[in-house]
Amino acid sequence: MGKIVLELDVMMAKRHKGLNELAEEVGITNVNLSKLKNNKVNAIRFSTLEAICRALDCQPGDILKYEEEE
């Protein structure tokens, strides 16, 4: 069985966006964005994903990856 991994930190670095700046643009707390960035969540709302993609000018596939578990 595999899992979905968020590579939000990679896209944030590519776009030169810090945690505080992105959290403000997306409209979520720094704590919640940090949890997303560090893959400490089991789910993400589509509205949050949409706001992140808008703020980072990217597609969901740019930050969501599927990994096979060994």
Image (tube, helix red, strand yellow):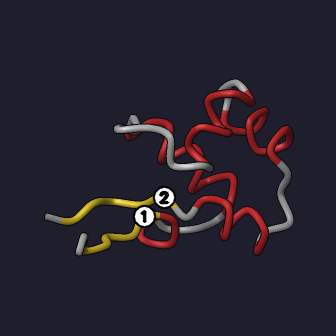
Q: In percent of the image, x 61 and y 29: which residue is there?
A: 32
Numbered mark located on residue 28 in the image: none
Q: In the rendered view, would you say 47 is above or below 5? A: above
Q: Secondary structure at mark 2?
A: strand
Quadrant occupied by the C terminus: bottom left
Residue 9 location in percent, x, y?
67, 61
Q: Amino acid at mark 1?
A: Leu
- Distance, label 2 to label 1, CA atoms, is 5 Å
Residue 16 location in percent, x, y?
86, 66
Q: In percent of the image, x 13 and y 64: which residue is there?
A: 1
Residue 20 location in percent, x, y?
85, 38
Numbered mark located on residue 6 in the image: 2
Number of other residues with Cα within 10 Å of mark 1, as a class: few under 14, some 14 to 19, many 20 or more: some
Q: Quadrant of residue 57?
A: bottom right
Q: Quickly name the residue at label 1.
A: 64
Q: Is there CB contact under 8 Å for labels 2 and 1?
A: yes
Number of other residues with Cα within 10 Å of mark 2, as a class: few under 14, some 14 to 19, many 20 or more: many
Q: Amino acid at mark 2?
A: Leu
